[in-house]
Amino acid sequence: MKIAIGSDHGGFELKELVKPLLGELGHEVDDVGCYSLESVDYPLEAKKVVSLVRDGKADRGILICGTGIGMSIAANRTPGIRATLCHGLFTAEMSRRHNDSNILCMGGRVTGPGLAMEMVKVWLATPFEGGRHSRRLCQIDSEEQECS
């Protein structure tokens, strides 16, 4: 799977820890920045990952800022993007199982490295259940009144 990953300065250190894990798990990694602890604007970094996922150039994305909140807000402004801010293994699993999340958001200042690594593993390994959840995603993504 091709994974686009990006961060702002608040998520840079965690991003640098997650990247090797993705490679070890057999995924291709596209690091779109940032590349240091120098302050950058998270919406610009989020847009890079969102574009790759939206355009099918990446299968999924990971965004990391200080809390994960800003990245989640910025990413979810784009139709077809389902960015989920996760804080534990259960939320990482359910974001995939029920919401078909295509971007995982985490907070580098609020999530420890060990937990972050486990969340990434769970998020990447968990399939989407479909069924009634597909209908609900249709209701989010569509202007139509009825989704089957």
Image: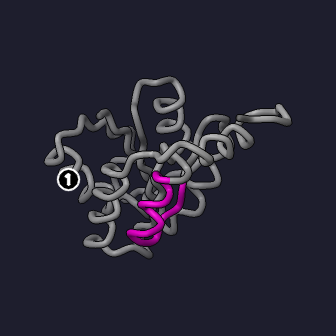
Give, as a three-letter code, the residue at label 1.
Answer: Leu
Q: Residue 133 versus residue 2: which sits nearer the camera?
A: 133
Q: Residue 42 versus residue 93: which sits nearer the camera?
A: 93
Q: Residue 43 versus residue 120: which sits nearer the camera?
A: 120
Q: Residue at x 46, y 45 (%)?
A: 128
Above-or-below relation of 147 to 67: above
Q: Tell me which secondary structure the magenta stretch mostly adopts.
A: helix
- The quadrant in which the C terminus is found is top right
Confirm whether the magenta stretch covers residue 94. Answer: yes
Q: Residue at x 55, y 54 (%)?
A: 71
Q: Residue at x 58, y 45 (%)?
A: 82
**For residue 107, side relative to residue 15 (left or right):** right
Q: Quadrant of residue 110?
A: bottom left
Residue 127 location (% of width, % of height): 39, 46
Determine crowd level at label 1: few under 14, some 14-19, many 20+ residues with C-alpha closer than 10 A: some
Residue 8 location (% of width, % of height): 46, 54
Q: Which residue is mark 1?
A: 21
Secondary structure beneath dot 1 equals helix
**For residue 126, side relative to residue 144 (left or right):** left
- The quadrant in which the N terminus is found is top left
Residue 21 location (% of width, % of height): 20, 53
Q: Quadrant of residue 30?
A: top left
Q: How is the image coloured?
A: one colour
Q: Residue furthest right?
A: 145
Give the number of callouts.
1
Give the extent of the magenta segment.
Answer: 84-97
Above-or-below relation of 114 to 14: below
Confirm whether the magenta stretch covers residue 29. Answer: no
Q: Residue furthest left?
A: 24
Residue 144 location (% of width, % of height): 83, 31
